[in-house]
Image (cartoon, rainbow, N blue to C red):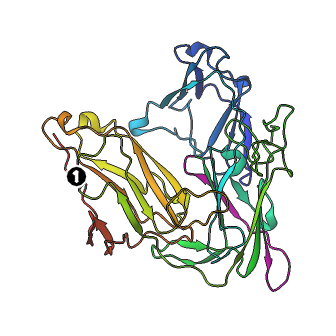
Amino acid sequence: SDDTTSSTTIGLNDDAVKIYPTGQRDTALPTTGAVARFTADRQSFVIRPVDFLGNPTTDTNYTVELLPGTSGILREDGQPAFSGSLSSGYIWQFQVSTLVDNTPPRMTSVIPADGGSFAPNVIVQMNFNEPIDPTSAAGVVGSGGTGFSNIEIAADPLAGGATVRPSGEYKISNQYKTIEFVSDLSCGTNSCGRTVYCLPSESSVSVIAHAATLSDTPPLAFFTSSGYDGITDIAGNSLDGNGNSTAEGRGADDYGWTFATQMDPNLDAPRIRSTLPLSGASNIPVDQAPQAVYDSVLQSSTVNSDNVYISTNEPASSADTFWWSVRQEVLTPDGTVAAPGDPTTQERVSINHRLYVPADDAGGGTPIYQPTMLSGIQNIYQNCFNPASSDSCAGSPNCCDEHSQTAACAAPTPLP
């Protein structure tokens, strides 16, 4: 489909994607055994089996293969999607339990807060307690509110006048737990030279996140060739918008709130308040996740593995196995994880990772790990992390081990 404002549902291409009980490749799901659905930007894909995976009596391991080459997965330009170190494709495994997920997702926090007044360059952000189906929550809104409609935003001028339905895009991030809306109305640039986008200023803005129409077996939502008509989790359970632990369907279980926008934008860059572990710390637990607490809520879609990562000097034999993933938590002023209705003033970024190599196992050297956060990170007002500063380091424009410097931070020298 060439429709860039909505998701598309197609049959599974079983020549390019193999899904099977581990060790039983010849039983891989056929084209008719699953449907594939993808977001408008063609970057997130959901493969939904027609029947439940596994069985009701024993846990079952599954393997997924994304195949390479001209007969495998292709980019939009027709070239193979996998190249370089991934030229052989991508394989992963997971385990299916005997239990069916019958718990609907719920909202944990929203930004801007209900009833507040905010600068017009604020991002609309919704955080959930579990991963959300990206095809139910991400999409493009065209002129006049056309296109994606599972979430709707309307702005009424405070001085009176016609309602405006901002055009823009809903994006999903934070391991599929955060949805953000960014309008396409440009209103300036930030300190990194990137365009900043605004909601209509001096307006009362209402947001409605729709639950999905229920199927005959709730909390599962009704799925059609056009997908879901509301937000669901990755198991297909409809949003529990009123938080009563029961899915009640579109209309009855929507989640809505209202806030106001001001005239002038917020131009304050984010900064780090604290880190864990401290710079130069040693003898830390091998499973400790590095953390940084920022003085403002961040634009979730910018907190990714391009802008947040760990460098290490581990020997090549183990460095190739070092993985990490980024997690975010919106916090209240006292540092607790925000719940619906709580004030939200800061954010904690954590980097989960493979276990560190203990010094005794490094062949005589000392393994060093260097968490790095780049200026690509932006806060909820789209101001970038530039200068890269903290409460104890001004940043000029970089902070390396809590020391200001103009040059980029040097990566640790690899061990032999």
Q: Position of residue 381 (x, y in %)?
A: 56, 71
* Residue 149 is at least partly visible in this image: no
Picture quadrant where residue 393 is located: bottom left
Kindly identify the amino acid type of the residue bearing the numbered disc 1. Pro
165 part of magenta stretch: yes
Residue at screen point 52% across, 14% down: 23
Which residue, as the protein is rendered here, is positioned at the far left?
364
Picture quadrant where residue 86 is located: top left
28 left or right of 3 in image: left
Q: Position of residue 81 (x, y in %)?
A: 52, 39
The front one of 34 and 324 is: 324
Residue at screen point 40% across, 66% down: 272
Picture quadrant where residue 87 is located: top left
Residue at screen point 63% across, 78% down: 119
Report which residue position mark 1 lands on.
Answer: 412
The front one of 344 and 229 is: 344
